[in-house]
Amino acid sequence: MADIHELQLALDLPDSLPSQDLALLRWHLGEEGGRGDDGYAYPLWGDRGPALRIGGVLVGELRSDGSGWALTVRQEAHPDEFDDLRRMVLWLGARTTTVGIIGYLRFHEAHLPDVLIARSGAVHRAILRVDGVVASVAEVIPDPYA
């Protein structure tokens, strides 16, 4: 359990997504009607309920927004799963209509995540590093009018 990472994804997919792609996503989310193949041993995002190491709740949702599909995932991931996760995130990157930040991967003890960015049909990882952290105890959410 010491190697657990938090994976969060939030992205949109086109309404034209083929039914076999939707079935694969549903299978990874642990939903009925999903179909697993493509070499995955088990659903990557089927866990629900309280997270064991990262705090909060594990989720995975795929919903139609009328003009496409909205996907949100928050799961715990072990490095043994990274090959399958990498393949799935790159697969999503080739299909997403979202440009920009689509999520992040964070070691459960780290303060800063690695940001996942979609552009031009691919996903890139931005590694955030700082020499020091500037903290504001008074303003958790900044006041835009201050």
Image (cartoon, grey):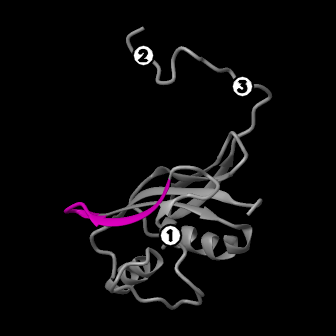
Residue type at mark 1: give it.
Asp
Q: Nearer the viewer, residue 120 or 127?
A: 127
Question: Relative to 132, is 64 on the left or the right?
Answer: left
The answer to whether mark 3 and mark 2 are in CB contact below 8 A is: no
Q: Nearer the viewer, residue 109 or 88?
A: 109
Q: Which residue is pictured at 70% across the width and 60% down the height?
A: 4
Q: Position of residue 82 (x, y in %)?
A: 68, 70
Q: Which residue is pictured at 45% across the width and 52% down the height?
A: 99
Q: Position of residue 71 (x, y in %)?
A: 39, 62
Q: Which residue is pictured at 35% across the width and 67% down the height?
A: 62
Look at mark 2 in the image and give the residue it sits on: 143
Residue type at mark 2: give it.
Asp
Residue 67 part of the magenta segment? yes
Look at mark 3 in the image and give the residue it sits on: 133
Q: Secondary structure at mark 3?
A: loop
Which residues, given as a range, are shown in magenta? 57-68
Residue 133 part of the magenta segment? no
Q: CA distance from mark 1 to mark 3?
A: 33 Å
The answer to whether mark 1 and mark 3 are in CB contact below 8 A is: no
Q: CA distance from mark 3 to mark 2?
A: 20 Å
Q: Crowding near pointer 1: few (<14 within 10 Å), some, many (20+)?
A: some
Look at mark 1 in the image and give the residue it sits on: 47
Q: Position of residue 70 (x, y in %)?
A: 34, 61
Residue 16 image label? none
Q: Nearer the viewer, residue 74 or 40?
A: 74
Furthest-right residue in this view: 131
Q: Is residue 28 above or below residue 69?
A: below
